[in-house]
Amino acid sequence: MKTKFQADENGYYGEFGGAYIPEILHRCVKELQDNYLKVLESEEFKQEFASLLRDYAGRPSPLYLAKRMSEKYGCKLYLKREDLNHTGAHKINNAIGQVLLARRMGKKRIIAETGAGQHGVATATVCALMNMECVVYMGKTDVERQRVNVEKMRMLGATVVPVTSGNMTLKDATNEAIRDWCRHPADTFYVIGSTVGPHPYPDMVARLQSVISAEIKSQLAEKEGRDYPDYLIACVGGGSNAAGTIYHYVNDERIRIVLAEAGGKGVETGMTAATIQLGKMGIIHGAKTYVIQNEDGQIEEPYSISAGLDYPGIGPMHANLAAQRRATVLAINDDEAIEAAFELTRLEGIIPALESAHALGALKKLRFRPEDVVVLTVSGRGDKDIETYLRYASELIHNN
Ligand SMILES: *Cc1c(COP(=O)(O)O)cnc(C)c1O
């Protein structure tokens, strides 16, 4: 069933989305558009995808009733534990799905872009598993900042290409990946890591991540005797963990959807990644959506303490949810996210990823009734962020 919250056949969510691509990519993108639904809806794909999610990624991920956090916030708070997946986040769901699709389309070579390296690691992991050649483009600045992830990708057999154009970050890595795809249209599949990019990527990634809300439904039915919550909360970088969390609930108006974007040092400071609050309509990565840009339409470098959230655009699905007021969007600043991460760690013994900590930071800004059932997606684990957490903790001690 198509509704105003799902992509139409041209990949539009309201006025957002579409496929704004160079002529030379037209055939690649068209081939993908013509094949993705056929493959994703085939029984054979569904079975192989489901069995890898179960036996390799470790799904279903638990839906955990966080008792001490519930007490603190005056509601029934369930955490959807994507942090417990293989490789530590939800990104593996999408990587498995897209590489399976690539194989069925006869592609031999996988390319990807990565900022913090999380999507690169997930893709390199699945390529090792499926014996596919893997090339990951990464800005040189990010290669230096994210050394452990670069070493992991190399250990997994991927080639990591440092990109030296522009600011040498995610946007530049994306441009380089697109250039590669133009040069190798016949044998190469471009795995995008979030609900961004030209149609069909946003819809395809949302479908591959929709396993999250399918599981929430059956887990809530079992635990609560009703298969829907009152609130769904998730962080948004490009939007894939949020899309997975809300997918099967988006048309059900009984459920409030809360999206947490990265406020950085504050929405007014210029050091922010709060795209929904500050972005203007533009084109990024082949899709029409809100983009943080200057008066000349040049994309501005976003900032967030969390590398996974500092994307200057936002998935078209989420831009539309905000424009239609279906979702409430809150900007959570660096310090609010850090505080929320320490709180979850001390109350529940779970160290969340910095990205997920933004979703947790939204709890303080909402007013619940005691009977409200709230599901919050913990998109990833915090192992990769320990240095940032410790640096912040020692600053606190110094300042007091
Ligand atoms: C990449 C990442 C995100 C942000 O990406 P989305 O596509 O918005 O989900 C959030 N959390 C974690 C742990 C990530 O690795």
Image: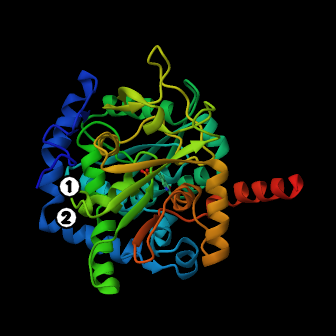
Instruction: Name the image quarter holding residue 249.
Output: bottom left
| Residue 223 in the image, given as x and y percentages of width and height | 35, 85
Mark linked to residue 104: 1
Indicate whether 225 appears above or below 363. Answer: below
Q: How is the image coloured?
A: rainbow
Would you say the beta carbon of the disc 2 residue lies within 8 angstroms of ligand 1? Answer: no
Looking at the rendered structure, the secondary structure element under dot 1 is: helix
Quadrant of the drawing holding the N terminus: bottom left
Mark linked to residue 50: none
Instruction: Left or right? Give the position of 79 relative to 324.
Output: right
| Residue drawn where x is 56% and y is 65% of the image | 381
The answer to which of 256 and 15 lies nearer the viewer is 256
Indicate whether 232 appears above or below 104. Answer: below
CB under 8 Å between discs 1 and 2: yes
Instruction: Left or right? Give the position of 10 relative to 109.
Output: left
Mark linked to residue 45: 2
Amino acid at dot 1? Arg
| Residue 118 in the image, given as x and y percentages of width and height | 51, 53
